[in-house]
Image (cartoon, rainbow, N blue to C red):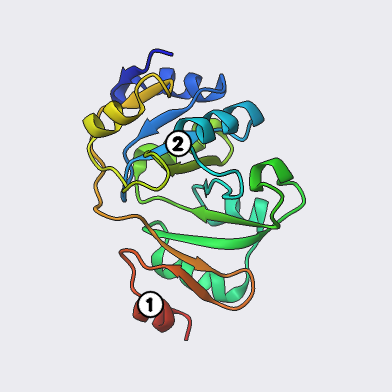
């Protein structure tokens, strides 16, 4: 497939790409992301483009606590982290609600969710009126990418479109499992010390 290059001014075309089941690479506040809506065929395209193992579910992006609570069970401890770090470079692993289909989480009962500190992405989610699935825009097992040209060279002809602007961060988000006991699964821009301080 031909990968179309967009700018953020092409919002309507970008939204149509996603609604039509296409996959889109865009910059985030952390690293470059690869996004799709919660559609079986679109999800399969993301796995194919990345060479990603199907035992690793795609993380979700939401634009508010209300949207998170529509798809996941949010504990009071999790709300402390949300109040402190959201929107931002933190992905929280929640127990999913029954309205989240198993094909979205590859049969797991948990879902990773992030609210990015990025007005463009938050606006996309608002316009779509649903969460989107977003993983890093790179070949699985390789390092995260920050520059759109690098993503284009890596992903061209594997994805439908790319937004031509660089990511604003330098590392992927911190991942914290809040589905049961608090567990830090990946250290990112937010440190373990900051996490533990926030939940005291």
Q: Depth check: 30 or 149 in front?
A: 149
- Alpha-carbon distance for marks 1 and 2? 29 Å
Question: 90 above or below 147?
Answer: below
Q: Tell me the residue at 38%/58% (across/down).
A: 173
Look at the numbered disc 2 and give the secondary structure of its residue: helix
Image quadrant where residue 24 sits: top left
Q: Position of residue 160 (x, y in %)?
A: 43, 20
Give coordinates of residue 40: x percent, y percent: 66, 31
Residue name at image x 63 percent, y 71 percent: 75
Q: Earlier in the sequence, mark 1 or mark 2?
A: 2
- At x 63%, y 68%, the residue is 179
Residue 151: percent from left, percent from top: 29, 33
Determine which quarter of the picture holds residue 74.
bottom right
Name the residue tied to disc 2.
50
Q: Nearer the viewer, mark 1 or mark 2?
A: 2
Residue at the farthest bottom position: 200
Callout 2: few (<14), some (14-19), or many (20+) C-alpha neighbours within 10 Å? many
Residue drawn at 34 percent across, 68 percent down: 190
Q: Which residue is mark 1?
A: 192
In the picture as drawn, the residue positioned furthest to the top comes out as: 2
Residue 134 is marked as none
Q: Is residue 91 above or below residue 76?
A: above
Which residue is more in the foreground, 166 or 62?
166
In this rendering, the answer to whether 154 lies above or below 53 is: above
Residue 166 appears at what percent x and percent y?
23, 38
- Say above or below: 112 vs 106: below
For the N terminus, which image quadrant?
top left
In this rendered view, identify the residue nearer to me: 80 or 44: 44
């Amino acid at each position: 497939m031909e990968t179309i290059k967009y700018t953020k001014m092409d919002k309507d075309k970008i939204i149509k790409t996603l609604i039509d089941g296409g996959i889109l690479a865009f910059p985030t506040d952390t690293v470059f992301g690869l996004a799709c809506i919660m559609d079986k065929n679109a999800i399969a395209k993301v796995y194919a483009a990345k060479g990603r193992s199907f035992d690793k579910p795609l993380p979700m992006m939401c634009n508010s606590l209300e949207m998170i609570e529509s798809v996941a069970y949010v504990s009071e401890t999790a709300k402390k982290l949300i109040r402190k770090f959201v929107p931002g470079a933190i992905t929280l692993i929640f127990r999913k609600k029954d309205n989240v289909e198993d094909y979205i989480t590859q049969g797991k009962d948990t879902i990773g969710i992030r609210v990015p500190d990025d007005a463009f992405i938050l606006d996309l989610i608002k316009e779509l009126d649903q969460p989107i699935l977003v993983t890093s825009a790179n070949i699985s097992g390789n390092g995260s990418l920050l520059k759109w040209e690098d993503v284009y060279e890596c992903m061209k002809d594997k994805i439908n479109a790319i937004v031509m602007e660089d990511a604003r961060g330098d590392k992927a988000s911190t991942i914290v499992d809040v589905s049961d006991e608090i567990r830090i699964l990946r250290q990112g821009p937010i440190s373990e010390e900051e996490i533990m301080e926030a939940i005291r």
